[in-house]
Image (cartoon, grey):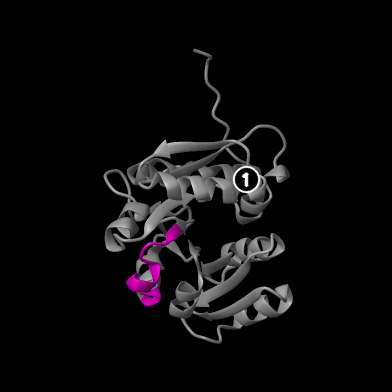
Amino acid sequence: MKVAVLGSGMVGQTIGKKLVELGHEVKMGSRTPMNEKAVTWSKEVGKGASHGTFEEAAKFGEIVFNCTNGNGSLEALKAAGSKNLAGKILIDVSNPLDFSKGFPPTLSVCNDDSLAERIQREFAEAKVVKTLNTVNCLLMVNPSLVPGEHDLFLSGNDSEAKSAVHKLLESFGWRNIIDLGDISTARGTEQLLPIWVRLMGLWKTPQFNFHIARASS
């Protein structure tokens, strides 16, 4: 499958490399066609990896990952082009973290809205699925880094798109995937980030995850 990864940071590089290892063709998209990080990544990963602009990547991909900084995601996706996203599954991994007042960050979108919903409204013909945003990038592609049972969340309006993403996540190694419902449920997962950041500070590591335990009915 041809996959676009928008964003050349650690998240995009990690997800892109995993996808290539699984046999997919991946084009990493950036603001400029010769982004240094993207060029280096494609050379290091080798066969199956390429790079280009946001627009070129979005045209290339059958599925698109949004791995850009949350506060720049809408701008990046506009550069990718709504026509290039129309009808495609758009997996949103980003978080609306605002570091303008230092650390820990606050959320630039919360309570009665979410970044994922804003993306879905802006790109109405795309099939936005929110997932992977509650774990560190290394854990995203290798859940076995945390032993035992732990969970991943899924939000989106299109059931077929969520089913396809579910299968892709299983290929990453995920087994406990909770479908929360429509895209508005991304408000909850994005709002997990403040406690995630606090736990990372407490434990001095990003390699942890949440597990939802419930009583049997």
Label 1: few (<14), some or many (≥20) within 10 Å? Answer: some
Residue 197 visible in the picture: no
Q: Which amino acid type corresponds to the residue marked 1 in the rendered image? A: Glu
The one of 160 and 201 positioned closer to us in this rendering: 160
| Residue under the image location 52 percent in, 50 percent down | 165
Q: Is residue 155 above or below residue 28?
A: above
Residue 126, by quadrant, is: bottom left
Quadrant position of the N terminus in the picture: bottom right
Query: How far across and down, in percent of the image, does residue 11 sit?
Result: 58, 62
Residue 195 belongs to the span the image colors magenta: no
Vertical placement of 214 versus 67: above or below? above
Task: Say which residue label 1 marks.
Answer: 170
Residue stretch rendered in magenta on the structure: 79-90
Q: From what the image shows, is residue 139 above or below residue 71? A: above
**Which residue is nearer to you in this view: 169 or 142?**
169
Q: Which residue reaches farthest bottom?
A: 34
Q: Please state the horizontal and vertical placement of residue 173, each as a whole percent of the image.
A: 67, 46
Horizontal side of residue 116 vs 26, given as left or right: left
- SS at mark 1 in the image: helix
